[in-house]
Amino acid sequence: MLNNTRNAAFYYMAEGYQTSGKSIMGRQSAGEGFLSGFAKHAGVDRFYCYGPNVEQYQHFQRSITQATGKGQSCSFIPFAHFPSLSQVGCLFVPGPCLSNDAWVRRSFNSRAYSICGVTHTTATERIMDSIGALLIDPVQSWDAIVCTSTVVKKTLERVIDSYADYLEDRMGVRPQMSVQLPIIPLGVDCEQFSPPEGEAYRAAWRDKLGITEDAVAVLYVGRLNFTAKVHPLPMFLALEEAARQTGKQIHLLLAGWFDPPTTETLWREDALKFCPSVTVTFLDGRQEAVRREIWSAADIFTSLSDNIQETFGLTPIEAMAAGLPVVVTDWDGYRDTVRDGIDGFRVPIFFPEPGRGEELAIRFANNVDSYGRYCGSVSQMTSVDLDACVAAFVKLVQDKSLRSKLGEAGRQRAVEQYDWRHVVRQYQELWQELDLRRMRELETAPRSKGKQPIPLRLDPFELFQEYPTDCINSGTLLALRAGNMRERLEQICSSVMNSFAANLLLSQQEQATVIEYLAKQGPVTVVEIMKLFSAARANQVVRTVGWMGKNGIISIQAVQDN
């Protein structure tokens, strides 16, 4: 290895690493946080961007500089230069889909580097299909998909087992999945959520929102989407009852954005209908000032997640980092992160037993129901224990000292376990383990000599070889056409219509060399042209012959047997 084995190149498309768009997804927040955390805490001497173009690389450089506050050494590895990833040793992919990159790697060398992905939502068709593909695609034991919670690992294993059952029935052999599935949580920058200006933020926001000192502010942060994020009704009902039982003035701060925007009226109407005693305020959570400061204005954080698109749940960790006690459902990753009665309260939640939802799965598979409707339908059948939820809110609303106690415990837990400095270290330890596996473990489906590396993405000249009259090979006879072919070459190359595939051919100057050679030597075979260049350029030579013939520079006079 030429570089620190605890480093990785980031598969970089800016959309997956920024929260400045019109709609912010959890995966974007996690991606942005991880890149920033890695830049601050990895301790590497260089940062690697694996991306499609220079524009993406420049965005990557700006992100690294913004995170560290100073210029850093960065390198760009274009998609077309993927073998250079071997110099780094690991490719980090901001999602769980490894197959495409594993196939590409196989065309070079499956041992060249590891691929490490991470789970976000696992409920979409694309993700489910990619998880199943782990059984048959050329992923290796030195690859990994980081599971952000215990339950998401169980979900992946259940999908893999189900598909393995099918493949065993179909083929008579049960395939084994070799990819590692470690559990590493998402992280947060704890300092960001407990800033020195916290008291000033609190005073300013509470004054702006009309929240008196003796009132209690309950905060929710995230997309306002009742089919694909969280249904608000249990929160509305529980806070209304808590307000009635305690006699306290309760403010509910919903810091998010209506997704889709057309649902805004529904949210506002239902808030008035189901919690009329609670002052409900909607804040635009896409605004940086809101995302940075609103935590300080709150006394309690809540997220009664009931949606299968969730796998970890980052906002409770952010709330804990801000020193807020949390009221959450006993759901997905919340079960790993929130200690019931210590950092806050986990409220019981229930849905139908296994075997009662096959119709929902088939409707989703057959495109009768959209992804949002599929998730929303499951959510409609998922029941939050309303009595337990009311009890949790009542305890916290009535007892300021309890809020302080739980909030401080949560803050300490966030600092000790979920700050990026700890999470980044776990990733680096994983990458080092994968590096060791690459050196000592057997390769799954090693490439056979003479066989195409990607069997469903064949060389087009092999796949469609029956299409033409004949194929250009080393024995094909070439001749220069009459006229000034150097001038014609320049004219043709000046047109985008004729030059868009130039990167796959000999350069214009090298083609001029071919023209000069043909002018002096007369008709020659392709193998004679090959001798003008290194053996590694043979494929480019044959492709260039096709291009020069297409554009009237040379003629293919005959095809001879090798």
Image (spheres, grey):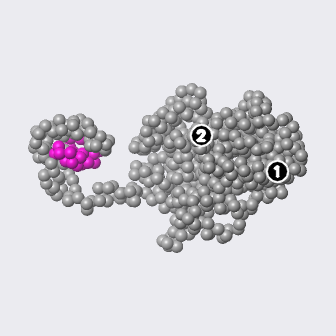
Q: Quick check: is 543 in the magenta stretch?
A: yes
Q: Say whether disc 2 or disc 1 marks the residue closer to the N-terminus.
A: 2
Residue drawn at the location 54% of the way across and 63% of the way down: 367
Q: Which residue is mark 1?
A: 240
Residue 417: x and y in percent read 71, 42
Question: Which label sits in the foreground, 2 or 1?
Answer: 1
Q: Main secondary structure of the magenta part?
A: helix
Is residue 40 at least partly visible in the picture? yes
242 horizontally vs 538: left or right: right
Which residue occupies the foreground of this view, 398 or 127?
398
Q: Is residue 50 magenta?
A: no
> In this view of the protein, can residue 365 be seen by the observer?
no
Mark count = 2
| Above-or-below relation of 421 to 152 | above
Q: Nearer the viewer, residue 241 or 444?
A: 241
Q: Is 55 situated left or right of 490 in this image?
A: right
The C terminus sits in image quarter: bottom left
For disc 2, the marked residue is 19
Q: Residue at x 85, y 42 (%)?
A: 249
Image: magenta residue range: 530-554
Report, in whole angstroms, how far the alpha carbon at label 2 lies from the one at label 1: 33 Å
Residue 524 in the figure: left or right of residue 412: left
Coordinates of residue 61 in the picture (x, y in percent): 51, 32
In which image quadrant can residue 552 be found?
top left
Element on which disc 2 rests: loop
Residue placed most toward the observer, 381 or 136: 381
Q: Identity of the amino acid at label 1?
A: Glu
Residue type at the position of mark 2: Thr
